[in-house]
Each structure stands twice: as structure tokens, then as C-alpha cells.
Image (cartoon, rainbow, N blue to C red):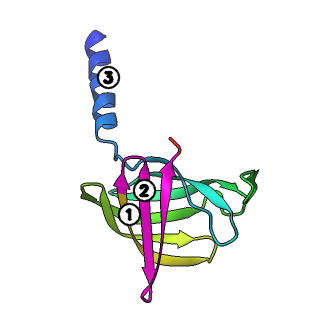
Amino acid sequence: MKRITLIAAACLLAGAASADPVAGTWKTQPGDDGAYGHVTVAPCGSAICGTIAKAFNASGQEIASDNIGKRMIWDMKAKGGGSYSGGRIWAPDRDKTYNSKMNLSGNSLKVEGCVLGICRGQTWTRVN
């Protein structure tokens, strides 16, 4: 029984150690309308994805939104050194999807996207 417990503990620790550093919940910067959200970023297969977990109005009050639960980031691949690319990002405030890249630095995540040469970017802060 002890051996099974030790093996299970080792597997859990190995999983935690291999967790991607970008995984967690991130607060976006306000969009064109002043609203912002919390995006939960996690591995999805061999890539990184992000889903809108909460929405807030310009006053910081949590609001109901049809966007909660929608995928915002997908197909993002870790390139090393806190760099991610090859993915897509959806901007709810403009309902546009962009080719995207991200750069992680501590508790800041710079997210950028471009479509037809027009680029946008935000710096998100880690919530947890």
C-alpha cells in the first residue's frame, strides 16, 4: 500500500512540475468598451488554449456575458524562454480573430495578434 501511495505521489509531482508556466487565470486589459475579462489558460493537447472565465464592466463589476466559456486562445505552442506562437486569439470587443503570439515575463503576459497587417496587443496580469 505504501508503494502505491509513493508512486501516486510521484506521478502527481511530475505532473505539477511539467505544468506550463503560462497556465492560470489572467486579467485582460479593457477592450474598446472598457470591459475586461479573466481568461483561464491551460494545456489543450499539445498546445495552449485560453477560455473566458469571467467578464467585468468598465466599473469592475462582474457581469453576465455570452462570451463566458468561449475559447479566446487556441493552438498556441511553447517556443521556450516564455515565448509562445503559432496560435490564434479572438478579440471579443471587435469580434475578430488574429494570428497570435505571447510572451510571458513573471506575472505579465504580453499577447499580440495580427490580421491583414493590422496588429493589436495587450499586457495581461496574472490573477492566479
Give the magenta-colored segment's residue range.
Answer: 104-126
**Residue 71 lies in quadrant:** bottom right
Residue 39 x/y as whole percent: 55, 54
Q: Label 2, secondary structure: give it.
A: strand
Closer to the camera, 49 or 105? Answer: 105
Q: Residues within 10 Å of mark 1 (few under 14, many from 20)?
A: many
Which residue has dot 2 on it?
109
Residue drawn 41% across the image and 72% down it:
100
Query: Would you say 40 lies left or right of 105 here?
Result: right
- Do tag 1 and tag 2 residues touch (Cβ < 8 Å)? yes
Query: What is the distance, in whole Å, between disc 1 and disc 2 at their CAs?
Result: 7 Å
Residue drawn 38% across the image and 63% down it:
102
Report the amino acid beneath label 1. Answer: Met
Q: How many marks?
A: 3
Ranked by sequence position, the earlier of labels 1 and 2 is 1
Which residue has dot 3 on it?
9
Residue 9 x/y as whole percent: 32, 22
Report the amino acid beneath label 2. Answer: Leu
Q: Is residue 107 above or below residue 87?
A: above
Depth-wise, is mark 1 or mark 3 nearer the camera? Answer: 1
Query: What is the distance, in whole Å, between disc 2 and disc 3 at their CAs?
Result: 31 Å
Query: What is the distance, in whole Å, between disc 1 and disc 3 at their CAs?
Result: 33 Å
Disc marking residue 102:
1
Depth-wise, is mark 2 or mark 3 nearer the camera? Answer: 2
Magenta part, dominant SS: strand
Report the amino acid beneath label 3. Answer: Ala
Q: Label 1, secondary structure: give it.
A: strand
Give the residue at the far top of this rendering.
Answer: 2
Q: Quadrant of the N terminus?
A: top left
Q: Is residue 63 above or below residue 93?
A: above
